[in-house]
Amino acid sequence: MDKLRKLLRDGETALCVHFTNDQEEKILAFVRLLHEANERLNLTGFKTEEAILTEGVLDSLTASTFSHILGKTANLIDVGTGGGIPGIPLKIVYPTMQLALLEATAKKCRFLEEAVRTLELEDVSILCGRAETLAHDPALRERFALATARALGELREILELTIPFVRPQGFALYYKGQNAQKEVKEAQNALSILKSTVVALQSVSVPFLPRKTTLILVGKEAPTPPQYPRRPGIPKKRPL
Ligand code: SAH
């Protein structure tokens, strides 16, 4: 068995999940594709296939801890997806879910198009633009059961960039590090304006890495006031 496949298998064991052969093939193909494209286009900070698999893919799949939610999620929007993380690994593992990948940088969107075509992923749309703008499009606003974001910014900022896409009673899932508790405290105002609450905060070990990922699950209780998100750049410059 080649090294990368062994790493994936061991990662599955550590995460207490089990994928089909077809899912494993797709995950490995995605890792190789992102690695190869990264050398040409500089899409992500992960330098090796092993790093993409562990720090990117296995980290994305720590969300399996919420499989009771993911398993019945009809559609997911991954905001600031970059090279497709966590959206593409989640789509491979939960194939019935419709996926929208939202990304501001055109060259990353081109890679995403190529990846979706090569991996033959169905029901995936690529939205190239800024979250602040696209969240006001009636076809996208409050249309998703779940939004995800990883490495997009601090919590109070990314709440404004993601919650408007979520339908009332839907969820948002954020991948965070050690500072999660502090970010939750600082996000109280944003949560209240955006009519959302933290429903779970869970630290999960990432296989083969010394660090843990803290997953923050937020529930949206009521529609987002129409003025949010504010203009491009404002959520970061003047977080709620
Ligand atoms: N989620 C990926 C990428 C993180 S880097 C991962 O975990 O590897 C953040 C990405 O979000 C970048 O690709 C950047 O272009 C994109 N981004 C940042 N702000 C954005 C915004 N307001 N709207 C859409 N995309 C944004």
Image (tube, rainbow, N blue to C red):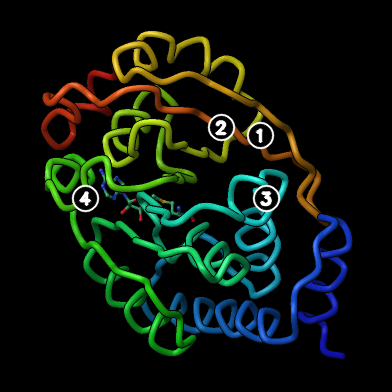
Distance between the alpha carbons at the discs numbered 2 and 4: 21 Å
Q: What label does residue 217 carry, if any?
A: 2
Q: Earlier in the sequence, mark 2 or mark 4?
A: 4
Q: Residue at x 35, y 16 (%)?
A: 190
Q: Where's residue 52, x and y in %?
A: 62, 67
Relative placement, left or right, of 108 versus 136 is right
| 2 sits to left or right of 131 | right
Gap in Å between the C-alphas at discs 3 and 1? 16 Å
Element on which disc 1 rests: strand
Compared with 103, 233 (above or below) is above
Q: Which residue is mark 1?
A: 214
Snapshot quadrant of residue 83: bottom left
Pointer 3 or 1: first along the chain: 3
**Amino acid type at mark 2:** Leu
In the rendered view, tell whether residue 13 sits above or below residue 92: above
> Disc 4, ligand 1: is the CB inside 8 Å?
no
Indicate the amino acid at tag 4.
Leu
Badges 4 and 1: C-beta atoms under 8 Å apart? no
Residue type at mark 3 is Ser
Tell me the quarter of the image containing the C terminus. top left
Disc 1 vs disc 2: Cβ atoms closer than 8 Å? no
Q: What residue is disc 3 on?
A: 67
Tag 4 residue:
140
Foreground residue among 226 and 74: 74
- Left or right of residue 215, residue 127 in this image: left
Amino acid type at image mark 1:
Thr
